[in-house]
Amino acid sequence: MIPHTLEAKPRLLESFRLSAVISGGLVFAYCLAVVIGWYCDIQSLKMLFGFAVPFGAAISYMVLACLIIALALLPGLKNVRHVCAAISLLIAFAGAIKLAETIFEADWEWFNLPLSGELANSVVLQFPGQLTPDGIIGILLVSTSLFLMTMHSAKLDPIWQALLTFTGAVALLPVIGFLQGIPEFCGLWGCIKVPVTLAASTLVLSFAVYSLRPGSGWFALLLEPDMLGTALRRSLFALMVLLPAFTALKAGAVAANVIDENTASPALSVLNLLAGVSIVVSQFVYAYRREQDLRRDTEKKLADLSSKVSAGIKNSAGSSNLVSFSPRYAVCPQCGKQLAATVKNCPDDDRAMQVVDKLEGQILDGKYKIVEYLGAGGMSTVYKARHIVLDKILALKLLQPHLLGNARFVQRFQREAQAMARMQHPNLLTVHECGFLEGVPFLLLDFVDGKGLDVLIEERARLSVGQMLSIILQVSDGLINAHDNGVVHRDIKPANIMISENVKGRELVKVVDFGLAKMLEDEPGQQKISREGSSAGSPMYMSPEQCVGDPADARTDIYALGCVMYECLTGNPPLFGQSVLETFNKVMNEKPQPVSAIVEIPADLDELILKCLEKRPEDRPATVLEFRATLKEIKERMTGARSAANPV
């Protein structure tokens, strides 16, 4: 399961691109100095930090650094990506030829391209020229990884990421060896001395290539969850900078005779180790304390919410705040009469009413500015809000004022905050704040700039199998996280599945509205939302056990997933009647028609949908994780069948 955390956070993506620019710039500056040293025959530059780097390796790394910077600064231009792909492929080809030349102990002068005339020292600079084995391997691996990365293919992601991991591990050995005072690596083939600055450059370039597409493939696992992911990213970035910095410090100190080799190695090794451990520990301690602070803050506000709501319900008759607060109302421009926002025309003069919203333009808690009204449902009103400090768009959800006297709806609203506060996942909305506005409970959530799945189905009549699979797999990812945190949604339906476009132009799915969520393990003394024998949910997507008020578990959400898949492919829910009672009767007693009888779909997908719609919970997939694994296998078989039918 690959999360889409980064795709939902453009600012995080920009920080990685900045890291790529900085890393590429450092390597470019170093290699440019070496190239100038070769052209001008300046020994101190050719032997920068006391290590000689071949001219061909310096040129290759300098060009690769330029490509990385271009891709980071111009990520949306396909022409730039294609040019960078072509150049990196040429460099990889040159590296492969030099590797073959080294293996066969040949001297293929025909392959070298002169880049200068005869210089003062009677040397003609050529590309790729004479390269050391470490230089050849570094050029080949980094350029090949960069080329595969520019393809933006999910199938190629594991390959270039594995190459980068291997490249970084190999490049790390000489750096650590140098810090430990081991200048050579010996084996059956003999001893070789690797230029440490070249190895450090390889390490930095590997990190830079990764930073160009960190949200793809299994590297995306480094980005979840938010707090620990932030600590891990900062630690890795610090270590990427720390190792080359200490290497350069030691090389410079030894070259300048400030300190001798025997003293520098153990001293700087211990210092580097202490600095690295301190950075990692401090980042994870910070992440832990930050997470605990957020948890305590959320719990405190939820406790305040519970106490204020209880007080409001008991004293609702004498509380003007709780009853009278209404942020939206309609005003007649002629007579000035104020009525409900739903009134279209003034009853006195028939003039069109103008809707006034007291919240638009207001700033809550000194940091949230209300931008505009988004819509309202039976339980809440939603506004678009902007975090002034972070410049981040959020959604403000207010409980409908007329429901404040109804303990059941207030508790549902409170339960939604509790449920969402326990979960952190890119396919679920994150709760950022909860509190009161003139006595009315509110939540601040992620803002989804997109449309509901119900709207998408209405626009397209029905979805293709591929579109449906892509959406439901992401919904499954979110529900797996919810169930792992002990939360059952209980109201999965197309209207509660929001679809937006992420930074890569792909569909990003979020499961919303946990107003009916049920904790799998209710804490002692905690009130239940529904009484025994009552039902809650949307009739056409409710499981048989919900219809009769039986306890809900993960398999209840699986039934609803089956209903959503059915509607995506056919345009209608599996079972529905002219009334709620008729729908309940069909859900309890009738079997839905197979999807394959309406549209053409794979037999195993049809079987899975019908299995999700079984009347008895024990006949459905046991967990969403099991359901998702089966769905993923079906998708992979379909993809393999299409590839076989359309060979390149």
Image (spheres, rainbow, N blue to C red):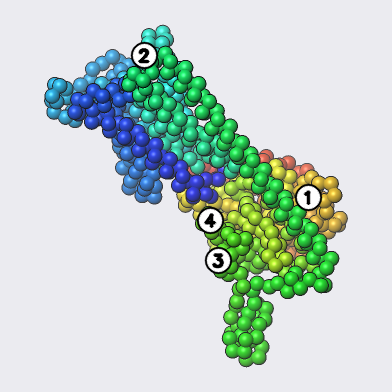
Which amino acid type is marked by label 3?
Val
Q: Residues within 10 Å of mark 3 (few under 14, many from 20)?
A: some
Where is mark 4, residue-wise? Answer: 389
Asked whether the viewer can see residue 562, the reply is no
Give the spatial CA distance, label 4 vs label 2: 54 Å
Which numbered mark, 1 or 4, is in the foreground of this view?
Answer: 4
Q: Residues within 10 Å of mark 4 (few under 14, many from 20)?
A: few
The mark nearer the N terminus, 3 or 2, is 2
Q: Earlier along the polypeptide chain: callout 2 or callout 1?
A: 2
- Whether residue 442 is visible to the viewer of this picture, yes or no, is yes
Which part of the image, by quadrant, shows the C terminus? top left
Quick one: label 1, few (<14), some, or many (20+) residues within 10 Å? some
Say which residue appears at 66% left-offset and 88% top-offset: 347
Residue 540: quarter of image: bottom right
Q: Position of residue 58 (x, y in %)?
A: 29, 29
Type of the residue with mark 1: Ala
Q: Mark 2 = which residue?
A: 192
What's the amino acid at mark 2?
A: Ile
Q: The residue under label 4 is which amino acid type?
A: Val
Q: Position of residue 60 (x, y in %)?
A: 30, 31
Reading the image, the residue beneath label 1 is 552
Identify the residue under disc 3. 371
Q: CA distance from mark 3 to mark 2?
A: 64 Å
- Sequence order check: which comes first, mark 1 or mark 3? 3
The numbered mark, 3 or 4, whose residue comes first in the sequence reads 3
Q: Residue at x 37, y 29 (%)?
A: 201
Report the front residue among 564 and 82.
Answer: 82
* Tag in front: 2 or 1: 2
Residue furthest toward the bottom? 349
Horizontally, is 552 left or right of 333 in the view?
A: right
Callout 2–callout 1 Cβ contact below 8 Å: no
